[in-house]
Image (cartoon, grey):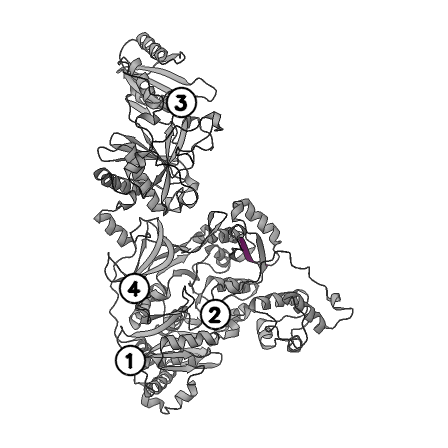
Amino acid sequence: MSSRPQPTRQQSDPGRSCHAAAVAVAGDPDEVADRFAAALARRGLAAARLWVDRVPGPVAAARRAAELARPLPADGPPLRAVLLRHDDGADLVLVARRGPLTGRALGELAVEAAGGAPPAGAEPTADPDGGDRSPGGGPEPAGDDVEHEGDTAWRGGNPRADRRASYAFAVPAGTDRLALTGAVGAVLARFGGVRRVRVGTLLDEGPAVVPVAVDGTLRDLAARPAEPAPGPTSGRAPDAGPPEAAAGVLTGDGPADTYLPSLAPPWPLTLTLRGTTVTCDFRTGVWSAEVVAAVARYVTRVLGQLLADGDRALTDCDLFDDAERDRVVALGGAAVDLPEPTGGIHDRVAGWARATPDAPAVSYGDDRLTYAQLDARAGRIAAALRARGCGPGTRVGVCLERSVDLVAALLGVLRSGAAYVPIDPTYPAERIRYTVEDSRVTLLVGADGVELDELLADVADDDAVGAGAATVGPDDPAYVIYTSGSTGRPKGVQVPHRNVLALLAATRDDFGLGPTDTWTMFHSSAFDFSVWEIWGCLLTGGHLVVVPHLVVRDPAEFHALLRAERVTVLNQTPSAFAQLVDADRRAVRRLGLRLVVFGGEPLDAGMLTGWFDRYPERACRMVNMFGITETTVHVTAQTIDRGLALAGTRSVGRPLPGWYVHVLDPAGRLLPPGAAGEIHVGGAGVADGYLHRDELTAQRFLPDPWRGGRMYRSGDRGRLLPDGRLEHLGRLDDQVKIRGYRIELDEIRQVLLDDPDVLAVAVTVDTGADAADARLHAYVVLADGADSTADLRRRVARILPDYMVPATVTPLPALPLTANGKLDAARLPAPAVRSLPAAREPADAGAGASRAERIRVVWERVLGAEVGPEDNFFDLGGNSLLALRLLRELRAQGLGEFTPRHLYVHPTVRALVGAGGTER
C-alpha cells in the first residue's frame, strides 16, 4: 500500500478547496496591479483582475476578514485578488484554489504584489499548506493495525446544537507541524484506545491523511515524507471532501501577513499552527468545548516532551502533570471516611432484635419470623456449629432451599464466627462437589452434609444460646461466594464483614432504607446480589420476603407476590425486570414499590420509558448500580429518570461514598476523562482476594499507585465522564470480528431495543468452521401484537452496516436466565434459520380430537419431537424457555390459562390436563 495520505470522497464544500493570503500594501493601486500582473507572468499563470474597493476605516478589519473567508465559486476562476483601501493604507487579499498555487507560493505572490522582492530560486511545486512537507510515517499498515479513532463517544459533542467554534492555546517554541501532528496523534490515540490515528493534512490538490503510529517517534514520523495525493487522473473526484481523520493539523505560517490554509475547516476538529499559537476550529455537534480544551492541554504537555527528546516514543508521553493527575484521580470518587465499624454483620441484626423484637424479619409464604425469633434461631444454629468445630477461621457451606431457615442458617454461621459459603441446591452435583472441596468447608449444611434439623437437635434451649455469639471483628471473613472463572473452574471471593457494613453505611441514608421497608430475596444465595438483598434489609430493620423458586420463574406470580406482601424495595437484574414489566402491563392493580435497584448486568435504560408512564419518578425511584462480587456487590449508583431513559444512558453513576474508580489503559496508566479503558475499583468494597488462589489474587488485586491500598482490576470496559459519572461499556472481551471488522455486540442489541415492539434482546456469534462463516444471531422478546421478525431485521438493515446485521432474528417468549437472573446464553435455542411452522389448528389432531390430544399436538410442535401422554416435558428437552412458549401457544389456542407452576408440577400431558387450566 502506498505511504501517501489517501484522500477520499466526502461532502463537497467550496471553502475546503480554497486557501487565502493577505498582506498590508503601500503605494498606488495601479502600481499594485502592475506588480501583481508581473508576478503572475513570472509563474506562468493566467492574468487575473485586481478588484479595488474603498472601505471606511472602522470596518476595514472586518471587511478584510470577510474577503479572506469568502471561497471561490465552483465554476469561477482559480484566483481572486482584492485590494481594500482604507484610511490607514491598504490590504491585498488573494483567494485561490489549492493546486495551481501552493501555500508558500500564494503568500510570495501577495508579497511581490505588495512591493516585496521576488523569491530567489525555483518556484516550489509541492509545498503543503505553507511550509514543511507533510509528515508521513511509512506505508499504511493493513488489517487490524489501521485505526481511525477507535471509540469516539468521548468527544462529547451535542448533535442538536451543531455550530462552529474555536479555541486558541499556546505551544512551546520550536513547535512545527511534524511535532504537532505527532502530539495530536499521541493524545487522540490515548483517548480512542488505539495504536494508530489518522491525522488530516492538506496537500496541494486537497485534503489527505497521515497515519500516525504512536509506538514510533517523531523521527520515525518524518522518515518518509508524504507524497502529493493522487489527482483526478487517478480516479479522485474533483469535489472529493476531506478523508476520515481523528483531527486535522494545518499550519498558517508563511511569507504573507495572514495565511488561511483552508477557508472551511476540513475536519470537525482542525488545529492550525501559527507561530507559537494553535487555533482549534471545531464543530460543537461533534466536539464539546470542554473536551477540546482538555485535548489542548494534553497536546501542549506532550509537545514539551517530544521537543525535549526526539527519540521518545509517542505512546510514552505522559498526558498529566501532577495537578492534572490529582484532579483525574479525585474525579473517580471523593475521599470519604466511612464510620469505623465494630463487630460483625450479626451484631447489627441482633441490635434490631433488641430494639424491635416483634417486627417482622423474614418470611417465606406463611412461615414468618420476627427479629427476636430470627435472632434466637440463629443463636441455636451458631451454638450447634460451634459444637461441631466451626468458628473463627473456618468456613461453613450452606446448601439449603429457599426458606426462612436459609436466612437463619446464614446468620447463624456469622454468629458462630465462621464465614458462610452459599451453594445453590439447584446447581449440578459436580459444581456443588467442587465448591465444597475447593472451599475446604469444616461443615456442609444441607445437600449431602448435615441437615438443619439434625444440627438443631444438638441444641434444645433457645434462651441459653440466643444471646451468645463469637467475638468477630470487621476484618474477619463474612462469606465466600464463587464466581465463574475464565478457565471454567469457579473461584471463591472472600469478603469481610467490614465491606458489607460499609456498603450499608454508604447507601442507607441516600436510599432512605429503614424498618418500614419490605424487600424481596429474589436471587440465589450463591449470587452476590443476595448479599445486598439479605443484609441490606436486615441491617436496616426491614422485612425480607424470600421468593419461592417457582415464583421467581413466573413473572405473573412474582408480580402478585410483590403486591400481596406490599414490597417497597425491589432488586432485579435488567433481564428479570423486563419480564416483570411485561407482567405489570397486564395487571390491573399497581405495585407499591418505592425503590428499584438494578445490578448484575448492564441496563438498557430505554426499557424503562413505559414503566415511568405507570410509576412516576417521584413515586418510584429507579437506580442503576454497577458492581462486582470482588468489590462487594455495588460500586456506583445512578438514579434513572425519564430523560435519561429516553436518551438511553449508559451511565452507572458516581462511586458510592468510600468507593472509587480508576479507568486505565492496557499499560496501567490513568486515562483522561471521557476515554474508554478498563475499570479498576478501590476503596471500602475491595474483597480479601480469591480463596486459595494467591497467584490469581496478585493478578487481579493490584497496588494502587495513586491512593494507596489495593484496587481490583475488573475486566470491565468503561469511561469516566468529566462530571465524575462512570459509563459502563461492557466487558473488554465483548468484541467479535466478522469479515475483518471489529463489532461490539452491545451496539447491535441497542439498535434492536430501540424498536418499540422489542422488550429484550440477546446477540450471539456463530464462528462456524471457518472465520469466513462467522454469523451474528439475534434473539428477541416481542411485545404482544408485534410484527414479524422479518420486518425487524429489515429495520436493522437500514441502520447498521451489512456486516453488523444479524443473519437471523429468532423470536422468544422470554430470554433464558441463570439462577442469578442473568442471561443464560448456553440455553438459547438454535437460531430460527427458517420461519417457525404456521400454528396448527386443533383439527390437525383429528376431527373431534379431545382437549388432551390437541394439547399433545402443541407439545410436539414446540418440542419438535413425538410426545406421549406420560412423557415428561423436561425429559424431552424442554426448559423454562420452551415452557413459556408452550404456555403462550396453549393460551393463544384457547386450550387453557396455564402458568409455569402448572407445568413444573405437572410436566406430562395427562397431568397437565388434569391440573385444570380451563378451556375457552
Which residue lies under the disc numbered 2? 819
Q: Main secondary structure of the magenta part?
A: strand
Marked residue nearer the N-terminal end (4 or 2) = 4
Height in image: 902 above or below 246?
below
Marked residue nearer the N-terminal end (2 or 1) = 1
Which residue lies under the disc numbered 3? 99
Circle 4 Cα neighbour tier, 10 Å, few/some/many (<14 / 14–19 / ≥20): few
Q: Amino acid at mark 4?
A: Ala
Front-most of 763 and 528? 763
Mark pair 3, 4: CA separation: 60 Å
Is the C-beta separation of discs 4 and 2 under 8 Å? Answer: no
Which residue lies under the disc numbered 4? 698
The percent coordinates of residue 576 (x first, y second) are 49, 64
Is the C-beta separation of discs 2 and 1 under 8 Å? Answer: no
Q: Is residue 782 magenta?
A: yes
Mark pair 4, 2: CA separation: 30 Å
The percent coordinates of residue 132 (x first, y second) are 30, 28
Mark pair 2, 1: CA separation: 30 Å
Q: Amino acid at mark 2?
A: Ala
**Residue 167 seen in the figure:** no
Marked residue nearer the N-terminal end (1 or 4) = 1
Which residue lies under the disc numbered 1? 392
The percent coordinates of residue 265 (x first, y second) are 38, 31
Q: Quadrant of the N terminus?
A: top left
Mark pair 1, 3: CA separation: 82 Å
Looking at the rendered image, the disc whose residue lies closer to the viewer, 4 or 2, is 4
Is the C-beta separation of discs 3 and 2 under 8 Å? Answer: no
